[in-house]
Amino acid sequence: MNYPPYEITSKILQLVAAISQRIGNINAVHLNKPTPELRRKSRIRTIQSSLEIEGNTLSTDQVTAILQNQRVIAPQKDLLEVQNAILVYDRMMEFRPHLLLSLRKAHGMMMNGLVEDAGRLRRRSVGIATGTKVTHLAPPPERLPALMKELMDYVKKADELPLIKSCVFHYELEFIHPFSDGNGRMGRLWQTLILKEYAEVFGFLPVESIIKERQKAYYDALSMSDKTGKSNPFIEFMLSVILEALEDLLSTQQRVLGVSERISFFKNAAGKGWFSRFAYLRYYKDIGTATASRDLKDAVDKGVLERNGERNRAVYRYK
């Protein structure tokens, strides 16, 4: 099986280690389980940023208004792009990252009404131009089925970290350019889809907003990877973007959990066995003994937990 060409550099390893540490920090303070409001705001930033990279003129306020079914005055094409993107991101759970059929279905929804061949591989040759100069000639259309099969096989079968795999896929989709239009937004969408299987925080992390801020570097990394014949420069760039997005989340968000949230989140850690108040306190290091006792009593009273024993010797388990 022919996998895409790239090498694991020391910089890639350093970035992967840093990202893994930040994800651990995020999980520790429960930012991986965002409030509905944070999830909604992040989704709006993701959609607005990804489309602005492609020339869409709508602001985050206008995207918010469309999401709330309010009337927005803007070019029809821009409105349709936003409406399509909202639909696609709302239905992300339907897509499977290793299936070409899923990719085509998502493209059909993303580009519906914008191109005639939405959801289908292109049937003509294309070149990517910078100004008046053609900087990349995409593979001819007759090669697309085989190239896309190899790429999807890589996603499904390669023994590689999803962090790296998502970056490789993103670059290769841009290089192959399987669709007549919409390849950029599909590459960013599909990277998110692959990353979601690695850590749930990526389901709402607005990586696209960092790409928008570093748009020139984004295209430079694509170009450098084209020139070297390996996706290393793009992998390094995208991992740095992911790291920055995670650090932004950690620095700007603070999560204060309520009683029911603490009890709910602890369920995975507790499993099906009995646990003590001490175990609960070790998991939630920022609460005191009295708060832990109240949490556990409240959960017992509501029938979420059952208790065996009294006072300091009491143990609990989820019903």
Image (cartoon, helix red, strand yellow):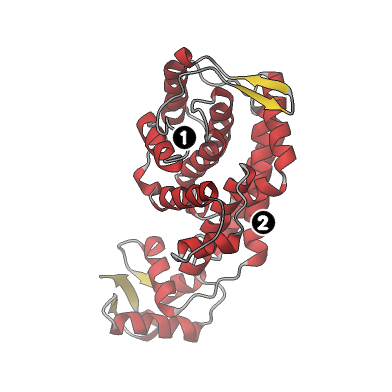
Name the residue tied to disc 1: 115
**Considering depth in this image, is 107 or 195 the residue closer to the camera?**
107
Q: Is residue 253 left or right of residue 161?
A: right
Q: Is residue 300 left or right of residue 119?
A: left
Q: Is residue 176 above or below residue 271?
A: above
Residue drawn at x 33%, y 74% is 316
Q: Is residue 155 above or below residue 142?
A: below
Name the residue tied to disc 2: 247
Q: Is residue 121 above or below residue 188?
A: above
What secondary structure is found at the residue carrying circle 2?
helix
Residue drawn at x 33%, y 79% is 299
| Residue 40, image x, y percentages | 49, 63
Residue 314, picture quadrant: bottom left
Q: Is residue 271 left or right of residue 212?
A: left
| Residue 60, image x, y percentages | 59, 60
| CB atoms of marks 1 and 2 within 8 Å | no
Q: Amino acid at mark 2?
A: Glu
Q: Residues within 10 Å of mark 2 (few under 14, many from 20)?
A: some
**Considering depth in this image, is 227 or 263 the residue closer to the camera?**
227
Mark with earlier residue (1, 2)? 1
Q: Amino acid at mark 1?
A: Val
Q: Is residue 250 above or below residue 223?
A: below
User: In the rendered image, which quarter contains the N terminus?
Assistant: top left
Residue 294 in sight in this render = yes
Q: CA distance from mark 1 to mark 2?
A: 37 Å
Mark 1 vs mark 2: in front: 1
